[in-house]
Amino acid sequence: MRTTWTLTKNRIRLALRNRAFIFFSLVMPLAFLFLYASVFAKGEPRMVGYMMAAVLALTVMGSFWGLSIQLVMFREQGILRRFRLAPVGPGAMLASSMLSNYFLTLPTVVLELALAKWIYKVPSFGNLWGVLVLVTLGTVAFAALGLIVASVTNTMQETQVINNAIWFVFLFLSGATIPLPFLPAWIQSVAVFLPATYLVTGLQEVMLRAASLWEVGAEVLALAGGTVFAFFIAKNLFRWEPEEKVTRRAKAWAVATVIPFLLLGVWESANGKLRKDARFNLDSVQRSAQPPNPTR
């Protein structure tokens, strides 16, 4: 545990010295906030509150991209080899990556909520405890998924190609960019198998309806179960040396990461609660944002 905490503090210090990290972890999320709030929501407080779920989800999902690139870069430059000589185990190395990323993501989330409150006058963020839990689970879940990508790729170029493909799916098919009810029915059917969908809809529920964690149990289960499963797989696939190549068995283990979301997707396809909740939240916000009819 002490090793993990020491590594976490060192990773935080290194990240704060990196200008690229500051840009992607702070500047870009704030740019998304102002884009969604000013352009898409047109500054209307209730619509901004609705869009905040997507804004926070995009901030949290950045964990997926950043950690996979960082781990591959460390392996290619021989940095991981030095940690191995310390000696440091794969579990401590991966856990410190996830923890440092979480501690660096949380201030951005708090700043986004504060700006939405001060600038756009969002009346309420609902169940803030639920927001914190979902942000925490989402950050570690997508970090773990990113670490799996880093474990099964051999070069930075290969990592970027896979990241782009997966990121595109998360971005456009989960409701993070276009509200889920606006998407075609067949895309909604696919969306229930994506971890990003559970993060977006869970945040909408706790922020708009002040739902309890019990009421978003499916979303919490999806993210928590996915985190545990993905971390276990990433730990077993971890490679210290760039010369170590990925076996077919390792790639099969990586594909097995989708199992928790596959099972929940099958359940959701039969139940339909997630899609109904997404439609209800959008309709209620649109009704409240409409100006009242003038009285005669």
Image (cartoon, rainbow, N blue to C red):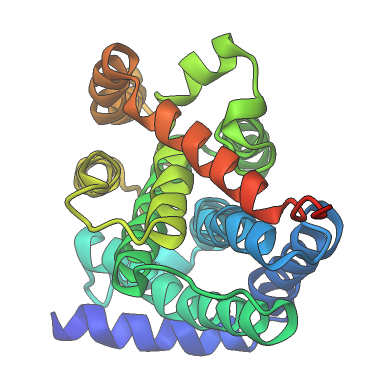
Quadrant of the rendered structure where residue 29 is? bottom right
Residue drawn at x 64%, y 46% as measured from the top left: 287
Judge left or right: residue 119 versus residue 171: right
Nearer to us in this view, 189 or 60: 189
Judge left or right: residue 218 versus residue 36: left
**The N terminus, quarter of image:** bottom left
For residue 245, say whether it is visible. no
Judge left or right: residue 16 versus residue 118: left
Residue drawn at x 52%, y 32% as measured from the top left: 279
Could you tell me residue 81's position as x and y percent? 39, 64
Quadrant of the rendered structure where residue 122 is? bottom right
Residue drawn at x 37%, y 88% as measured from the top left: 9
Q: As displayed, is residue 217 above or below residue 182?
A: below
Could you tell me residue 213's position as x and y percent? 22, 56
Nearer to us in this view, 14 or 39: 39
Could you tell me residue 6's position as x and y percent? 28, 87
Residue drawn at x 32%, y 72% as measured from the top left: 96
